[in-house]
Image: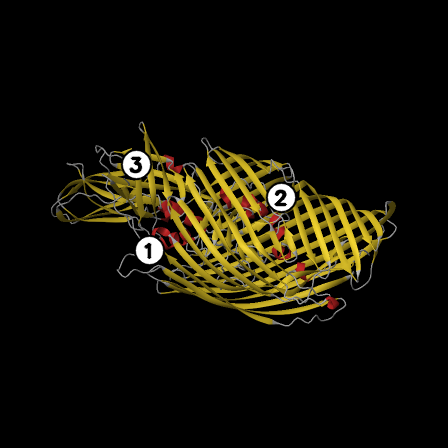
Amino acid sequence: MKHFLPFFALMMSCAVVSAQQSAFSTGTTSSTTTGVTPKGNTKISGQVLDSLSSKPVEFANVALIDVVTKKPVNGTVCDADGKFTITKVAEGNYSIDISFIGYETTTIGNISVEEKKNEINLGTITLRMKEEILKEVVVEGQKAIIEERVDRTVYNAENDQTARGGDATDVLKRVPMLSVDLDGNVSMRGSSNVMVLINNKPSTIVASSVADALKQIPADQIKSVEVITSPSAKYDAEGTGGIINIITKKNTLQGATLNVDAGVGLRGSNLGLNGNYRTGKMGFSLGGWGRANYNVNGRFENEQTSLNDGNTTVSSQKADTRNQGLFGNYTLGWDYDINEKNSLAASVRLGARNNNSWQDDLYSQNLFNNTSSSSLQNVKTIDESNNVDVNLTYTKTFEKPQKEFSILGSYSRNNRNNDFTRRTLEVNEAAALSGIKNNNDSYNEEMTIQADYVSPINTNQIVEFGAKNITRKVFSDFKYAEDPEGDGSYTTIVDAIRSNNLNYNQNVTSGYLSYTLAMQNGYSIKAGSRYEYTVIDAYTKTEDDIDIPAYGVFVPSVNLSKKLKQGNMIKASYNRRIQRPSIQFLNPNIQNSNPLSQSVGNPQLDPEYTNNFEISYSTYIKGTSLNFSTFWRNTNNSIQSIRTPKLLLSGQEGIETTYANIGQEDAYGLSTFANVNIGKLSLNGGFDVYYSMLDNNIETNPDAGAYSASNEGWVASYRLFGNYNLSKGWGFQFFGFYRGRQVQLQGYQTGFGIYSLGLKKDFNNKKGSVGFGAENFFTPAFKVRGESSSPVFEQKSLNVFHNMSFRANISYRIGKMNMDARPKRRRSINNDDLKDGGGDGGGDMGGGQQRGGNSSGFTPQVTPKAKAPAAATAKPTTPGDSTAVVKAEGKWAYTIESPQGGEGVLTITKEGEQYAGTIFNKRFNSNLPLTSVTVSGNELSFSYHVSFGGNEMDIMVKAIINGDAFSGNMAVGQFGTFPINATREP
């Protein structure tokens, strides 16, 4: 049991669930078919060790052979210490065959049992690994692109080659229920109020700008993306739309590797180096990645009519746009096992961004009171930032499985400069040089301390509780300067509106309690509550105290699920969420890079509150997995934009945008996606559709400048991903996404679509690969139109984007990792403020995080009424009969004897004397090729490869065929061996 627990914990993490559940759906079980032995009084014992490591070979098969008949008459398997005992052996001459998958069979001969001999000790027996097993593992199989978990949807980005060379924005476009606009802003089911985590933890770069943060994460280093629509009480209450958790790749095996990734394309290039080293109790990782964006251009047109103080202004604008940037991301990770039950982990992440954008030949024309004016300007915006995240975690486990305590601390800071310069070239068609610029220096600093405790109650209940404190400091210093002569000499404008600062200090203290119950009838419930108390101290250079009252919020959550037959499941959930305003909404700096439009934040904003309801159903129909979910979202005190005509800082009539807690948002809709496997072709796709209702809850009062606004309508998005495995290491993938028309409070925005193709070739036993990609190759440019209106203004816009792109990528892995180290039971607490660990076994691209873990926290096991062993153990196997004639080819329906279970279909084909085949996992809808299939008499042996978390493993099976059934054992590395049974399908 103690050796099964680490295996169980590892399997419950996303990475290994898919790898080993694939395994468990494919194994073969060898049943014991020992002959009948006359009973005697002699006992034969011994111990089996690995010839290289001298470690015990647990579950090795020991068969007692009668030397006269050459048939097995008794047998057993080795225990966790490699020891075995065969009892009640009768008088006679015997030999013993000792075998285990991956090892050469060892025979001990000349064993003579005399009538009065009571015990024979064979001592230490060594097994030598087969030469072919010692070679480096090559991964052939892969997980399904999309997996449905109890509390989340997981997109396995590591299997998608069409995003290589891109960043996290390119990956999130492919994820169900998510939508990404052309500026990189992310929304979930129409709500942009989402919490984005990186390896289960927040970062100040995300708090400052989600779009900017995504550009700093290379697509090649993203293992998976988790969409959590109904977070439990353990998660922070932030994010009314839900949580997006980006899991990066890591390596936890012994040894050293260095990965090199490079790419070049029409609109961007990238270079990445990632190294891992692990030996004994300690592991290190170091990674660096950089990307350059260039040749990103387009144009825009804008027309607007505004009414201010009885005067009508008609304006029009047009300009060409350019954008280029440099992005970097560097990580250092370290973890250390103090002993079996205590561990430390630390990581440092550094990020940098330098983005420049231009509006060239910005031509503006105004008609005010029958007077026409025009201007020609160039605008340059510089947006630079750097960030650091430092994390330290201590974890203690106990003898009692799943009982854990952890303390986590983190420090995060983002420094940002967001400046623009607007140079005037002409006024009314005549040369007139002048300039205006705005410098905005800011930082966002965050310190977190957190403690979590989890303990099981019996075998089917778990209680979790914890406490947390977050201290945030936000500072923004801004000033305008003017150059009236156009000679490059700027003078600062000193007034409270254009030169000021904001100090915004926030402290959030929280605690939570969560209870999980799993019942024997397939029902499970996870209910909890969280309380957060927020204190804010805000002031500016000219205002000593901005009155923002402290507030507390109670956040309940309930998740119900029912397991149905054949792996089907139905789920229902409710949760309450809060969305605190970010610096983009708070900053009082007036952004007026466009002379006819400006925006300004509101430091007195309150949070908004949302209630989320969801029901979902997942099923499997003839090799196709389907998921349907419906939801309703209600948001009160919604932060919405207010647009009003006024005289802007540029001195021209235009439209100002600011923010207030004035709205109500309701949305209900349906999401569905499917996974289909057709031979070598796999297809994944789906759509999201919802009905959005927006209302600013204002009564029209022209004297006060207040006008009622509301809007509603259907919004839909669609996506399709395909993968086709060609021969000799070639693979082909395609992807398409379309986001339909967006409903806004005062108007709409038309939809857009993207598509891409990718071709990859693996070489040198999959250590290296080269790939080619193309995006929007039939669409050199596409257009997005927008329209908004109120009783006092109308605005129409057109944006043209040139997104056609071609790129080439190459990657190579140097070094080798192995499975020498026995895994320990590790922490599996998941929380959005945890600075280490990962819901999917992920981490900071290396060793700076805990390993293992269950993506949904701990899952209790239901104890059946009948007394049964806690873990399945391998059955003793008997050497096959080499003279037997059996039919191995065909389809076999198999089951795995493990707590997780597992079932699927094994397909074996025969061409001439060569065998091949595939193994299909019903739960994850994954079909993996068998890398070797051997039939010797009635003995069937096969293996296949799996990949999890950037690591690789061979799964090996040996079984005995008896007519239309077979049974045997499946070996999953050092994690254990489990019985497998199968029957032939008609």
Residue under numbered circle 2: 290
Residue under numbered circle 1: 1
Residue contact at pointers 3 and 1, CB within 8 angstroms: no
Is the N terminus in the top left, top right, bottom left or bottom right quadrant?
bottom left
Give SS at disc 2.
Answer: strand
Q: CA separation, marks 1 and 2?
A: 46 Å
Give the residue type that dot 1 points to: Met
Q: Quadrant of residue 663?
A: bottom right
Give the residue type that dot 3 points to: Gly
> As drawn, is 343 to the left or to the right of 424?
left
Give the residue type that dot 2 points to: Gly
> As drawn, is 81 to the left or to the right of 738?
left
Residue 100 screen position, x and y as percent:
30, 42
Nearer to us: label 3 or label 2: 3
Residue 459 screen position, x and y as percent:
35, 62
Q: What is the image's colouring?
A: secondary structure
Q: Residue at x 43, y 63 (%)?
A: 526
**Residue 52 visible at all:** no
Q: Residue furthest top?
A: 912
Judge whether 880 appears above or below 236 on screen: above
Q: Which residue is drawn at 21% across and 34% down?
A: 884
Nearer to us: label 1 or label 2: 2
Q: Which residue is drawn at 58% across and 40% down?
A: 165
Q: Which residue lies furthest to the left in this view?
A: 115
> As drawn, is 865 to the left or to the right of 437?
left
Q: CA separation, marks 3 and 1?
A: 35 Å
Residue under numbered circle 3: 890
